[in-house]
Amino acid sequence: MLQHRSRAPARGATLPRLLARLEALEPVQPTQAPADLLGDWLDWQRAVALSRALDDVPQAPEPEAAEHAGMTPDGTASACGPDAPAALASGVLERRAALVDAIEDDARDWTRPLRPRPGEDGMGAAAGAGAVQRHCQGLQRDLQSAVGRLRGELREQLARRGDGPARLAAVDAVMEGLLAPREHALLVPVVPALVARFERLHALNAGADAGADAGAGAAAPVAPAGWRDRFRAEARQVLLAELDLRFQPIEALLAALRSPGPDA
């Protein structure tokens, strides 16, 4: 039932390319390879933690914890038993589908505030920019929260599968700590870029309306609903690209869980 929501992950360059298009700029090609950048970001404390994760023998889970791994605190089945990889994969698909639905939901014009201030109709630039910011920041927070929770759950499952998977889980935890601040710094400007795009489009269409009123024969302005529809479509593309980018570690951990164990 969820198969129509399963999409091939977009390339990492999709998000910066879309953001560059919003600014009418040419995408900047990276001047350093990812491995070189990673070496610059890895301070000695992170390097020690990563070395330990790679070299230490992972600690096996307690027998009691393993015995009850298939149950939640209320006694119901959880994604921690023999069928955990399939159950977790299904849960990841469901959560991803819910996030896609939230991004693609266009039941209302979220470029206008739900509750305009007294005396306003919500069509002004400031009101629209505020509405766009609130909507997109809410979606971005949902993405960050969902990915962090899923990533932790997948690592817990890997830690129960023996030395190799447990070591991968430990490495992923270190890498998340290393890259999370960089990811945050790179993704926080996404919403301001969308707000700035909205403000530019609002100004352009307001000028077109004024020009049409000033004299006959002027080019017909773009209908407000039309440009707002197009902006919302652009914003959805950007947010879906951010979702794809954030879910790449989830896809990798899921692939590791699906791989046969050492005793297979």
Image (cartoon, rainbow, N blue to C red):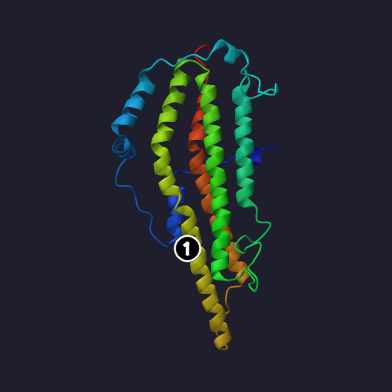
Is 142 placed above or below 26 here? above
How far from the left and from the top, in percent, is residue 87?
63, 27
Dot 1 falls on a residue whose secondary structure is helix
Say which residue appears at 44% left-offset and 45% top-offset. Answer: 184
The structure residue drawn at horizontal position 51% and vertical position 68%, both measured from the top left corner, is 201
Near-viewer residue (120 or 201)? 120
- For label 1, count other residues whose C-alpha is less than 10 Å away and answer few (under 14), some (14-19) or many (20+): some
Image point (57%, 79%), residue name? 209
**Residue corresponding to mark 1:** 196
Q: Is residue 130 above or below residue 188?
A: below
Q: Is residue 199 above or below residue 171?
A: below
In the picture provided, is 39 more to the left or to the right than 108?
left
The foreground one among 248 and 66 is: 66
| In-front residue for pair 184/158 | 184
User: Could you say which quadrant of the image residue 108 lies in?
Assistant: bottom right
Q: Is residue 214 above or below residue 184?
A: below
Percent of width and height locating residue 131: 58, 61
Q: Give the residue drawn at x 52%, y 30%.
A: 152
Left or right side of 165 for 128: right
Question: Which x, y percent locates residue 157?
Answer: 55, 23
Q: Quadrant of the C terminus?
A: top right
Can I make out residue 227 in this image? yes
Image spot of residue 160 (x, y percent)? 53, 18
Identity, as a three-letter code, of the amino acid under mark 1: Ala
